[in-house]
Amino acid sequence: MRTPIIAGNWKMNNTIAATKALVTELIPLVKDAKAEVVICTPYTDLATAVELTKGTNIKVGAENVHWAEKGAFTGEISADMLVELGVTYVIIGHSERRQYFGETDQTVNARVKAALAKGLKPIICVGETLEEREGGLVEEVLVRQTTEALKDIAKEELANIVIAYEPVWAIGTGKTATAEVANDTIKIIRDTVAKLYDKATAEALRIQYGGSMNPKNVKELMAMPEIDGGLIGGASLKAPDFSLVVNY
Ligand code: PEP
């Protein structure tokens, strides 16, 4: 019922030359994918990625967007700028932004609203730290992050939103949540959305798992009923690996 979506998060990797090589290699490898395929690239690679993927089944996303339309925000990028480039998706609230760049639930919400207002599709990242999991706070953290991220977002907009459940302890560590843990935790997020909106809206929402998803564990994770795709960091940087995940 929900179309799976596999998105690569390149983070701060790949020059324009590397982007050309990676995307050119990737296009034929993922052309028959059942899942929606997205690559989220650094700002400097977006134009190249959009140009190369024209007429293919690969969509391009950015890794962040500012909440203001324009103005004195040195170093930031607006939704209009991304739309003009032909970008479709944008990652918002990645744990690295929360950890290193002062991202809060409130700024996540402001960015989501700015993205939606211009027709960009947010991939909203939520997830608990190891301390929070060990402290029994998973539900509290995810309910808070999800509720705040979606504050004042109309029900109709949920069709344009993807949530990525990314346990912080599983990102870039090689530690994957077991398929059962990922599934049960995503269920908490879906139940939260059902309470905020309604059951049908929650059932239609796509929720990805992210955290060391790779060609070896993708099948098991994607077999779980609540998991609608993946946000892929490390394994999105090599075309053969990413294509194996996409074609799970
Ligand atoms: C990510 O950065 O969103 C991520 C899931 O990274 P990795 O796959 O490398 O754990």
Image: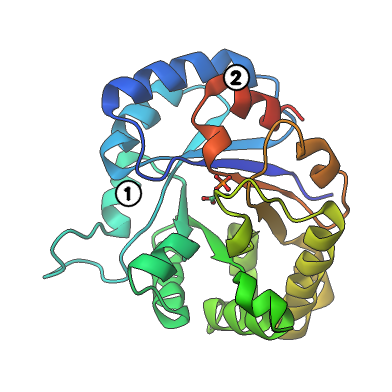
Question: What residue is rendered at 34% in x and 48% in y?
Answer: 83
Say left or right for 139 vs 112.
right
Could you tell me which secondary element the residue under label 2 belongs to?
helix
Q: Is residue 198 visible?
A: yes
Q: Amino acid at mark 1?
A: Leu
Residue 156: x and y in percent read 63, 69
**Residue at screen point 44% across, 21% down:** 22
The colour mode here is rainbow
For mark 1, what is the residue?
A: 82
Quarter occupied by residue 32: top right
Q: Is mark 2 within 8 Å of ligand 1?
A: no
Question: Of the numbered discs in the image, which one, if any, rests on residue 126?
Answer: none
Secondary-structure class at tag 1: helix
* Along the viewing direction, whichever of 18 and 5 lies nearer the viewer: 18
| Label 2 CA crowd tier, 10 Å (few <14, some 14–19, many 20+) | some
**Residue 128 visible here:** no
Identify the residue shown where x is 66% and y is 46%.
Answer: 230
Q: What's the residue type where badge 2 is placed?
A: Pro
Residue visible at 77% across and 30% down in the picture: 248
Residue behind mark 2: 240
Query: Is residue 196 positioned above or below 88 on the image?
Result: below
Q: Is mark 1 within 8 Å of ligand 1?
A: no
Q: Are marks 2 and 1 in contact (CB under 8 Å)?
A: no
Q: Is residue 176 placed above or below 72 in the rendered structure?
A: above
